[in-house]
Image: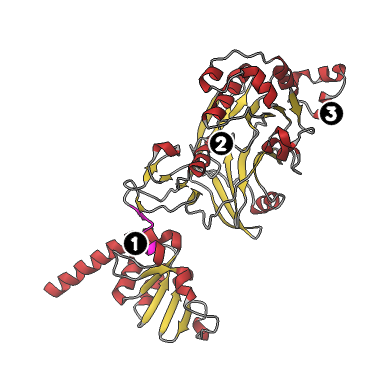
Amino acid sequence: MVVWKGKIKPQNGEKAYKLDNTDFEVPNFFVITPKEIEQLFQTRNPEKILNSSLDLEEIREAYKEVGMSSEVRRASSKARSLVGGQRDNSRVSIRVSESFISDSELDIGASGLEDALKNVVASYFEEGGREYPNIIVQKMIEPEYTGAVVKGDKDYVEVVEGLGVSLEEGKTVPSMYLLENGVVREERVPEIQLKITRNPMTGEYRERRLKNPEKPFENSEIEKITSKSEESFKFVYKRGSFYVVDVFDARNSLETLERVQVSSGEIQGVVGKDITLSDETLSPEQYEKALISKKGGYTSTDAYRARKNGKPAIFSALNMKEGDTIGSRSEDDGVNSSTATPLTTISQAEAAFSSSSTYIDSYAEVFAFDGEEAVLDARIIELKGLKSALKYLEGDVTVLMDKPDEKVLYEVVNQGFSLGVPQQSMAEFKNVLEVVERRFILENLRYLSG
């Protein structure tokens, strides 16, 4: 027995029920019920499921109609024959309707129905499923873009051009948006993105690497679609319209797009030694403590698995390399154990200055004073002039910076100042500071010996 969109009930699975009750436009789908799945397979053994022979007569008939609208599907046989061209060439996705991590199958045609259904059901039981599942079979829309909105204190959006296969399999870096109070505060478009499309003649995937891809959507479009739901969802976009294909439970805790931590937990150690570094995403059983991947997004399959297994992971970390340190004392409590220059976070530096702190009017935009201590916000000063300006300062000064520059940091070290940097950039500043301080020491030794 199958149940069509428009008649879905809670017992047909959480995902199908949410899709059937969303205000977004949703591609047509039907659900294969647990009773039907049990009759088809008569086993929960994954190996036997994969080797079984299935009678899919009812499901094949439903498949022929999934490309039709519900109005056409309920019309007379004569009216349905007028759109017969839609019946036998639909592409569908197949996945479990319960909120459960298991493999899904995308872009499936008539000839691939049986194998795809076997793979999904076998994966469900391999992952620990006990009861027979509801299975969603949904019409695929050949998208211009595929993406997801993950709700949180700051809503996160990730988008890839073409099919979502590259994102799901962790093969590319998505374009990203981070919204605060409904407004895009940060965005990131990769230099290279893998675009996957389907060859309409053969059905095979075609891969193309896009150099400097265009920003997929204007901020106003992202703000509009994100505001329409309090729940996280996946979407496809085609010809000016967004279609929601999944509604799911997830809340991100991202503060920045510099590192996309897809699974919570402390990440501490040396990249490439204590922390596994990979080009593409990995399944949790393939790394010991934590993973940093140069590709992948929050909705990648391996991100779901990392969350399920409680293994912390950071994806699309383009600037991380072997030897970098994450989670040092400097990141945890503001004390740097390997650099002489005091290093703290910007938030900690600013916390010492209350709203009643006095300001010098002519320097109000860059200076704040509290007694004999001063904070210089160098983030809004051009680097060219900053180096010279630092030479004329004296006293207990904390310099706020968001990007490390060796020449400026050399002057900070020379003057004995402290640094305030973004929390997520602690390790990067630490590495540059170590180089600068070694150079400073060597130059002073030469001066003393000469």
Sequence-wise first label, 1 or 3: 3
The crowd level at tag 1 (other Cα within 10 Å; few <14, some 14-19, many 20+) is: many
Q: Residue at x 55, y 46 (%)?
A: 175
Question: Residue 108: percent from the left, percent from the top?
Answer: 62, 24
**381 relative to 225 in the view: left or right:** left
Residue that mark 3 sits on: 71
In which quadrant will I find the C terminus?
A: bottom left
> What is the distance, in whole Å, between disc 1 and disc 3 at their CAs?
63 Å
| Residue 129, visible in the rendered structure | yes
Question: Residue 436: percent from the left, percent from the top?
Answer: 28, 64
Residue that mark 1 sits on: 430
The crowd level at tag 2 (other Cα within 10 Å; few <14, some 14-19, many 20+) is: some
Which label sits in the foreground, 1 or 2?
Answer: 2
The question of residue 244 being in magenta is answered with no
Q: Residue at x 76, y 28 (%)?
A: 4
Task: Report the span colored magenta.
Answer: 324-331
- Which quadrant of the view contains residue 89? top right
Q: Is residue 113 above or below residue 95?
A: above
Sequence-wise first label, 1 or 2: 2
Q: Is residue 25 above or below residue 372?
A: above
The kind of residue on which mark 3 rests is Glu
Residue that mark 2 sits on: 101
Foreground pick, 44 / 260: 44
Question: Residue 444: percent from the left, percent from the top?
Answer: 19, 72
Q: Is residue 333 above or below residue 296?
A: below
The secondary structure type at the circle numbered 3 is helix
The secondary structure type at the circle numbered 2 is loop
The crowd level at tag 3 (other Cα within 10 Å; few <14, some 14-19, many 20+) is: few
